Image (cartoon, rainbow, N blue to C red):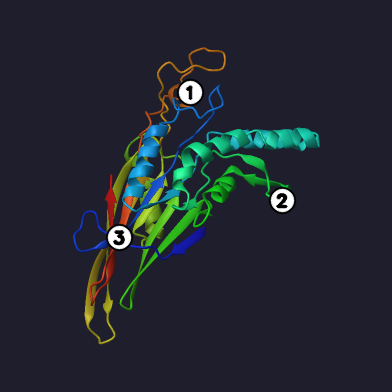
């Protein structure tokens, strides 16, 4: 697990008059690939929708966390096969294999990630990423994952979030302090029904009840639930208190279309891709935007957690 903490600049709430808020949009499942011309394939990924969302979140003063699967190569099984191939290859062949995705990584940076620079807090690798060789400014060659290459390109404050990221949003006001918390992950599996991936997040919530958001990516489902909790105790003067809170479990969609009209393979034959071949549900396009709002109540300050669809 990686923990990412920071103190952001709060802005007036869009929805609740009189409160301030921090806005974060989790995005995932771009699954970008190159087309035959060498550009990004906009038939597979709804790039225009993604860029509109980025523009809108920036307009609201928000930031992003990327929950994985930025590119479509490589799956875990493909990475294993490539590792075995590289192990028995000449140095020059190994370097060529390592550098195979550099044109894709450069295109993603230039065409998709550029407007997000300086506004991404963390990246989870997900399942689809590659191991690549990059040339350092001094001329040395460095082997990194595509995830780290994207972190390096996006620059501060972006960090590699590992497979499980704990986000701590520190907020202060006239001597009072509050921490908004979120658990971010790419997720795994989820079943075919609307409630199946939600059930996985509910089990996570049993362990992470202090987090206001538990967020996972599942590009075939977009669903959220709110789990209530109650805490109680005594203050320093012996007065009893009772406070309610909630944890939102959020399963976001993505930007990879999955079902594509007249899709063709390299032999120009009809090929529906893995979504259609496996009879999976159509992908849900888009994501949500999360809001953390500090409530500076003198007796019981708290963080309210909201969500914009």
**Residue 165 drawn above or below residue 171:** above
Image location (x, y in percent) of residue 202: 35, 51
- What residue is shown with label 2? 138
Looking at the image, the residue that sits furthest to the left is 17
Q: Quadrant of residue 213?
A: bottom left
Q: Earlier in the sequence, mark 3 or mark 2?
A: 3
Q: Earlier in the sequence, mark 3 or mark 1?
A: 3
Q: Quadrant of residue 18?
A: bottom left
Secondary structure state at the residue bearing disc 1: helix
Nearest the viewer among 184 and 13 is 13
What crowding class fits label 1: few (fewer than 14 Cα within 10 Å), some (14-19), or many (20 or more)?
A: some
Nearest the viewer among 129 and 135 is 135
Secondary structure state at the residue bearing disc 2: loop
Secondary structure state at the residue bearing disc 3: strand
What crowding class fits label 3: few (fewer than 14 Cα within 10 Å), some (14-19), or many (20 or more)?
A: some
Check whether the beta carbons of the residues at disc 3 and disc 2 lie within 8 A of each other.
no
Give the quarter of the figure containing the C terminus: top left
- Number of on-image labels: 3
Image location (x, y in percent) of residue 180: 36, 63
- What residue is shown with label 3? 11
Question: Distance between the Cα atoms at labels 1 and 2?
Answer: 41 Å
Nearest the viewer among 269 and 42 is 42
Nearest the viewer among 250 and 150 is 150
Image location (x, y in percent) of residue 254: 40, 38
Question: Distance between the Cα atoms at labels 3 and 1?
Answer: 43 Å
- What residue is shown with label 1? 273
Residue at 38%, 43% (x, y): give it: 54
Q: In front of the other: label 1 or label 2?
A: 2
Check whether the beta carbons of the residues at disc 1 and disc 2 lie within 8 A of each other.
no
């Amino acid at each position: 697990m990686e923990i990412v903490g920071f103190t952001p600049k709060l802005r007036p709430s869009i929805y609740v008059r009189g409160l301030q808020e921090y806005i974060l949009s989790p995005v995932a499942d771009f699954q970008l690939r190159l087309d035959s011309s060498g550009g990004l394939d906009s038939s597979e990924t709804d790039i225009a929708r993604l860029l509109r969302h980025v523009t809108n979140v920036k307009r609201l003063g928000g930031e992003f966390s990327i929950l994985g699967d930025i590119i479509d190569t490589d799956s875990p099984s493909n990475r294993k096969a490539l590792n075995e191939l590289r192990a028995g290859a000449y140095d020059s062949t190994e370097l060529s294999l390592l550098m195979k995705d550099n044109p894709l990584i450069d295109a993603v940076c230039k065409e998709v990630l550029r407007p997000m620079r300086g506004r991404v807090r963390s990246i989870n690798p997900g399942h689809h990423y590659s191991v690549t060789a990059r040339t350092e400014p001094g001329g040395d060659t460095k082997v990194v994952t595509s995830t780290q290459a994207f972190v390096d390109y996006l620059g501060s404050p972006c960090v590699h979030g590992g497979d499980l990221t704990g986000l701590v949003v520190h907020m202060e006001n006239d001597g009072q302090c509050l921490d908004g918390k979120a658990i971010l992950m790419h997720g795994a599996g989820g079943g075919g029904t609307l409630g199946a991936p939600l059930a996985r997040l509910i089990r996570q919530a049993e362990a992470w009840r202090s987090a206001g958001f538990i967020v996972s990516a599942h590009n075939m489902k977009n669903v959220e639930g709110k789990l209530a909790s109650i805490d109680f105790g005594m203050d320093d003067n012996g007065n009893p208190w009772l406070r309610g809170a909630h944890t939102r479990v959020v399963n976001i969609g993505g930007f990879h279309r999955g079902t594509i009209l007249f899709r063709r393979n390299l032999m120009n034959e009809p090929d529906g891709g893995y979504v259609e071949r496996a009879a999976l549900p159509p992908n849900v396009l888009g994501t949500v935007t999360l809001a953390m709002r500090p409530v500076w109540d003198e007796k019981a300050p708290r963080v309210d957690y909201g969500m914009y669809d």
